[in-house]
Image (spheres, rainbow, N blue to C red):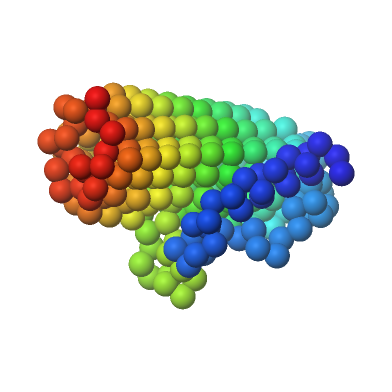
Amino acid sequence: MNKKNLKLLGILLAIAAFPAFADGAHAQNMFAGVDLASPAFTKADMTRAQVEALIAKHGTGAPLDLSDKSLNGLDLSKLDLSGANLRGARLNHANLSGANLSGAKLDQVWALDAKFTGANFANASLFGAQMVKARMDRANFTNARLAGDFTGASMVGANFTGANASADMRNQSMGLMRGILRSANLTDANFTNANLSRADLEFAQFKGANFSGADLTSADAGGAHFRGARLDGAKVKGMDVGSAWIDASQAAALAGARNLDNAIKQ
């Protein structure tokens, strides 16, 4: 087994170590029955040059269609993929740093350990996206739909202004579809007016993050780190902050949160 396959296996084992992923609330986790070592998840059936050629000849009208393509490991950095249809595409270990993905459809995309540093996801849809351990520092998620799995992702300084990572209550037959930011690094991220209602924020790092006007209603934030975060104006009713790390000065802003007495205050 090569190094990439071993790394993918490590990601899968890391996820399996969290028992919560086995229950219905995490049904958007699509790893069950998937062979991550198969060519569909480890190789590419196109080159960067071929993707660039498609972009060059693509005119107005229907969006660029890269749905269900295997683009694993490709360097697609700084490409203009705005509005593209990438539904179900495989981008594991791909590099899309600085890429323009604004308005793109990334529903059910696979991008394990992929690199999106500084990428633009404004108004994009990432419903059911599998982006475990992706590197997304300083990415722009303004007004994006984020009902995907970002467990262990690095999203330092990312912009989530107006983004929607809330649970989709219309898809109960599929389980609770919601944004999973479990154990992600969101230091200095901007969540102004973002919707994180019922999102999974457990053990995430939010040091210095801005939650002004954000909706955190009934979010799961046990064990998360909020010290230095701005929480004024945030909706926190029913938010679980058991064992979360908070500043004593944040207690007033978190009034109405569950398990506040069990939060670790300094």
In the image, taking residue 45 as reference, residue 134 lies left or right, namely: left
In the image, taking residue 194 as reference, residue 234 lies left or right, namely: left
Residue at image location 27% in from the left, 54% down from the top: 218
Determine the residue located farthest toward the front in the rendered image: 262
Q: Quadrant of residue 22?
A: bottom right
Image quarter (top left, top right, bottom left or bottom right) of the C terminus: top left
Image quarter (top left, top right, bottom left or bottom right) of the N terminus: top right
Using the rendered image of the protein, determine whether residue 241 is visible from the camera's viewpoint.
yes
Determine the residue located farthest toward the bottom in the rendered image: 173
Viewer-side residue, 243 vs 87: 243
Q: Quadrant of residue 117?
A: top right
Give how far across and how far down residue 245 sits, in percent: 32, 33
Give how far across and how far down residue 65 sits, in percent: 65, 54
Determine the residue located farthest toward the right in the rendered image: 1
For residue 200, above or below residue 234:
below
Residue at image location 60% in from the left, 30% down from the top: 97
Residue at image location 28% in from the left, 24% down from the top: 228
In the image, taking residue 111 as reference, residue 163 lies left or right, namely: left
Viewer-side residue, 145 vs 244: 244
Residue at image location 19% in from the left, 31% down from the top: 250
Using the rendered image of the protein, determine whether residue 87 is visible from the camera's viewpoint.
no
For residue 167, above or below residue 193:
below
Q: How many marks?
A: 0
For residue 103, above or below residue 136:
below
Give how far across and how far down residue 192 sits, in percent: 28, 36
